[in-house]
Image (spheres, rainbow, N blue to C red):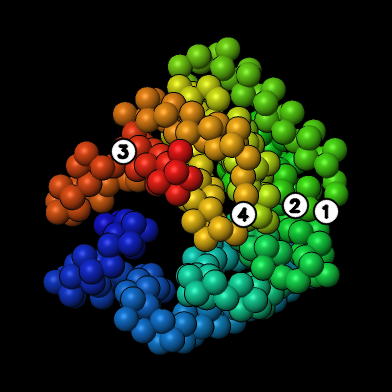
Amino acid sequence: NLLLLYVKHQYFDQAADVMAENTHLTFKMDPYLYEYLDAIIVQQSSPEEAFRRFDDIANRHTDNQRKITKQVQECRQNNDEDAVKKAVNEYDEALEKYIPVLMAQAKIYWDKTNYNMVEKIFRKSVEFCNEHDSWKLNVAHVLFMQSTRTLFSTQENKYKEAIGFYEPIVKKHYDNILSVSAIVLANLCVSYIMTSQNEEAEDLMRKIEKEEEQMGYEDPERKIYHLCIVNLVIGTLYCAKGNFEFGITRVIKSMEPYSKKLGMDTWHYAKRCFLGLIENLAKHMIMVRDVVLHDCIQFLEHAELYGKNVACRIQPPLSAAAVHELQGKNTVTYEARLIKGLLLLVCDL
């Protein structure tokens, strides 16, 4: 459990130290788990070698799954229900071991933003994983990221493919839509907009708004960010396409009321749009009306006011030096003041 937690939170050096100091215990571990952890640690120094190791593990998993599939078919032919149940459970367990290996393998190329290669890896595994929610979700993410980087002629097809994977996930939890990750809802809304399905996007956003209002009545103190993040992602999309006036205006409106919508995640999206705006203004690539710039200043002043106790990033728990370095700077107030200063400097306001 300790090793898995280290790996999950990317403390790879600590994981390597624990394995090196306790070699007598590593021999007692599940061989698949040991090989998986070893490959992840190797990935930090040699991604190519890690990919090869993950590939070896994945091939063994797929061979095993084919063998179990054959057993299931034989048991069904013999009408042996108990044996079928046992084989199906065995198959499900094998699949749960295979999925983390597949995701780790795909992450090597995801980190390099080589989304075409990630898609190829997922397509190879469709035989076994096409019904698994984690696989479908990650395929949807890959298709969405590809659609933001492809030529306009193929862009719409990628968005449509992404919708095909996102929609079943959202519809499965439609009665409790806030249980779905906000970024999944946001990506689905963007995909609808980019394929001219604006009514579907509006229906989904109305559904999210209705559930947020209901939850607000039940627990007035609770902060809910789903609709805010959906609007932020849509605003970010417009900013990325060069329409900063509409994009920034959408970002600003999505953060109201600040007392409930200003949080670590929402600030992360918002500040990227403002930094993009400042960069383009500094390069004299865009012109923005004065009224929009004044709205930006006003927004940053509100963020400064309400962000005193809102952290910008999670402080690493195992690094005292990093915590000391971030003291006083890891707040929305600090970053909002800094961004406001940059904007005033660039615009000479």
Q: For mark 4, what is the residue?
A: 286
Residue placed at 40% from the left, 46% from the top? 345
Q: Around disc 3, counting alpha carbons within 10 Å, would you say few (fewer than 14), some (14 to 19), or many (20 or more)?
A: some
The x, y position of residue 185, in whole percent, is: 66, 43
First in sequence: mark 4 or mark 3? 4
Q: Residue at x 68, y 56 (%)?
A: 241
**Gap in Å between the C-alphas at discs 2 and 1?**
6 Å
State the residue in front, 269 or 105. 269
Relative to 142, 38 lies left or right: left
Tell me whether the residue at label 3 lies in contact with that at label 1, contact meaning CB atoms closer than 8 angstroms: no
> Do residues under tags 2 and 3 come within 8 Å of each other at their CB atoms?
no
Q: Position of residue 215 (x, y in %)?
A: 58, 19
Residue 207 in the image: x percent, y percent? 73, 29
Q: Are marks 2 and 1 in contact (CB under 8 Å)?
A: yes
Q: Tag 1 or tag 3, which sits nearer the N-term?
A: 1
Report, in whole angstroms, how far the alpha carbon at label 3 lies from the one at label 1. Answer: 39 Å
Circle 4/circle 2 CB separation < 8 Å: no
The residue at which mark 3 appears reads as 334
Tell me the crowding category of disc 1: few under 14, some 14 to 19, or many 20 or more residues within 10 angstroms, Cα based.
some
Query: Which mark sits nearer the N-terminus, 2 or 3?
Result: 2
- Tell me the residue that label 2 is attached to: 191
Q: CA distance from mark 4 to mark 3?
A: 27 Å
| C-alpha separation, residue under disc 1 versus residue under disc 4 | 27 Å
